[in-house]
Amino acid sequence: MPRTAGRPEQQPHAPHRIALIGFMGSGKTTVGRLVASRLGYRFLDLDTLIVENARKSIREIFNEDGEEVFRQIETEALYSLREMHRLVIATGGGAPIRQENQEFFENLASTFYLEVSYNEFFKRTGQDHARPLLDRTEKQLKGLYKSRLPVYRSLGQRILTDSRKPEDIAAEILKILVVP
Ligand code: S3P
């Protein structure tokens, strides 16, 4: 595997695929668009791809087919990108958790983890009805947040996002990629 994959280190050329991971509300889509535009790469939001392919919303997939079917579709959508070049991918918050998906983040993309604190996540997402996971109680959400942190941290280079502008976060990622 070329050294452009996995946790990004200082590297002279931008890698073929850049993946952004992190909890809901961490800004993956906004930051991903900025990074892609700066690199002249294509931007893809994995949830949008899933919705287009399934021709129904994430909530409809969860309600009608169940979370396990959603996770299977998510894995297929992720690996459908494995050959694509010059791409920035914003993934759904649960994508890195499924073990089958972890090879993608380790070996097939340079992965950045956008870290948002629990409180900031709660403020940013509010009562967003499009996200089925937000139907859970606060205690369950806190548990989910805590359980995911170590996985995110092990798969991606950690970038803090609280109280920061998307432009600054994108600039930090570009600096790590050594894009002048
Ligand atoms: C999910 C996050 C969502 C979406 C789905 C499940 C999760 O994406 O994939 O609702 O498990 O955290 P965002 O992280 O873009 O909100």
Image (cartoon, rainbow, N blue to C red):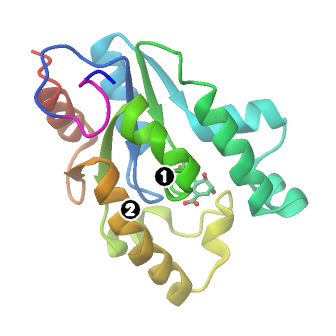
Q: Give coordinates of residue 164: x percent, y percent.
A: 20, 51
Which of pointers 2 and 1 lies earlier in the amino acid sequence?
1
* Residue at image location 33% in from the left, 27% down from the top: 34
Q: Give coordinates of residue 140: x percent, y percent.
A: 55, 84
**Image: 80 above or below 134:** above
The C terminus: image quadrant: top left
Residue 115 appears in view: no
Pointer 2 and pointer 1: residues touching (CB < 8 Å)? Answer: yes
Considering the numbered disc 1 on the image, is that residue within a helix, a strand or a loop? helix
Q: Which amino acid does the dot numbered 1 rest on?
A: Pro
Q: Which amino acid does the dot numbered 2 rest on?
A: Val
Residue 8 appears left or right of 138: left
Quadrant of the rendered structure where residue 124 is?
A: bottom left
Residue bearing the label numbered 2: 151
Residue bearing the label numbered 1: 96
Nearer to the camera, 53 or 97: 97
The magenta-colored residue range is: 3-8
Nearer to the camera, 145 or 132: 145
Considering the numbered disc 2 on the image, is that residue within a helix, a strand or a loop? helix
Kindly report the secondary structure that dominates the magenta region of the rendered protein.
loop
The N terminus: image quadrant: top left
**Image: 15 above or below 124:** above
* Residue at image location 11% in from the left, 28% down from the top: 175
What is the residue that sits farthest to the right in this orientation? 64
